[in-house]
Image: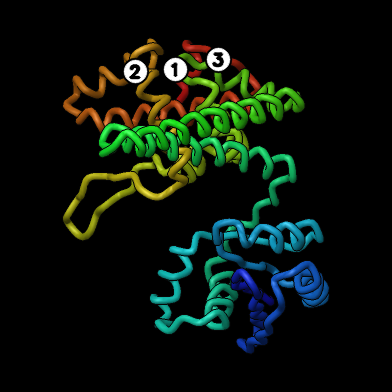
Amino acid sequence: MTCAGIDVAKDHLDLALRFDSGDVDTRRFDNSSDGIDQIETLLSEADPERIVLEATGGYERPVSAALAAAGLPVAVVNPRQTRDFARATGRLAKTDEIDACVLALFGERIQPEIRPAPSEDQEVFSALVARRRQLQKMKTAEENRLGTAPSEAVRSDIKEHLSFLEERLAQAEHQIEEAIENSPLWQEEEELLCSIPGVAEATAHVLMAELPELGEANRQEIAKLAGVAPLNQDSGKHRGNRTTWGGRASVRKALYMAALSATQYNQKIQEFYDRLLDRGKAKKTALVACMRKLLVVMNTMMKNGTHWNPEYHASSA
């Protein structure tokens, strides 16, 4: 078994090939189209079982997309996982070459799941949704500054910037709507998700863009991906409270707003929420449970291609 690790930097790519004998071959390539082509040719000949890269804010996308398009088994993993793995194996030093070797070893020992690369349309849609979120954050920050602006000149400048941000936000919304109109599949997904009382279009767009596994994974997997799966905190005789953490923050935030709305406008979710409160659960705990219930319902609906049915979906989640 051969596993490969690629450490991605802005200017270069460090490749480590780990063979079943334990030997490791490391090389450096330019992070360019030519460098990616050279890595693709080399890995096609080596035929590794897994090629592991870290999610590095987008720098990994060109190389991971090129390798996946060539039919190579690519796994993009969370950097926190690989760093914890490096510490656990006693590798405390950190260089690009060492990181590539750690990624190859991580692929051999942990065998992370190989997922299909997102299509070009999916990447564009995800970028549009992310850009809308960035514009909303900037707008909120400027609105907060406006309330404490010390002079009229500063207030005038902030108002002008707010006007610009509102225009850009409207354009981003229009581009998202246009992308959905041009895709019958996304139209259907949006319609299914928005059939749930409490789920608005903005929430549906985040889930469609940043949780493409929705409808493909099982209920346990989808809950872990979103960070709403309760995890045990037990040790010896101690039985700690189960907590939720990790997952995709943007998806979790969207689910939170949907659950908050559903506890008021979705009768089934409201009844579930009230039952948890009656049993003595804290409001935050009950709300997280509603988030998980909503997500499992969405996963079932997307898998079966069915609209919201309060009698079936609420009882099956």
Q: Is residue 91 left or right of residue 218?
A: left
Mark 2 or 1 closer to N-term?
Answer: 1
**Splitting the image into 4 quarters, where does residue 30 fall?**
bottom right
Q: Nearer the viewer, residue 82 or 119?
A: 119
Q: Which mark is residue 130?
A: none
For residue 170, above or below residue 5: above
**Spatial CA span between label 1 and label 3:** 9 Å
**Spatial CA span between label 2 and label 1:** 8 Å
Q: Is residue 186 left or right of residue 218?
A: right
Q: Nearer the viewer, residue 30 or 139?
A: 139
Q: Which mark is residue 263?
A: 2
- Residue shown at the point (62%, 18%) measured from the top left: 191
Q: Give the x, y percent position of residue 243.
A: 29, 45
**Splitting the image into 4 quarters, where does residue 144 fall?**
top left
- Residues marked 2 and 1 touching at CB (< 8 Å): yes
- Amino acid carrying label 3: it is Ser
Residue pointed to by mark 1: 198
- Residues marked 1 and 3 touching at CB (< 8 Å): no
- Crowdedness of circle 3 by 10 Å Cα count: few (<14), some, many (20+)? some
Q: Give the x, y percent position of residue 95.
A: 51, 82
- Residue shown at the point (71%, 63%) measured from the top left: 63
Mark 3 or 2 closer to N-term?
Answer: 3
Q: Is residue 77 left or right of residue 20?
A: left
Quick one: SS at disc 3?
Answer: loop
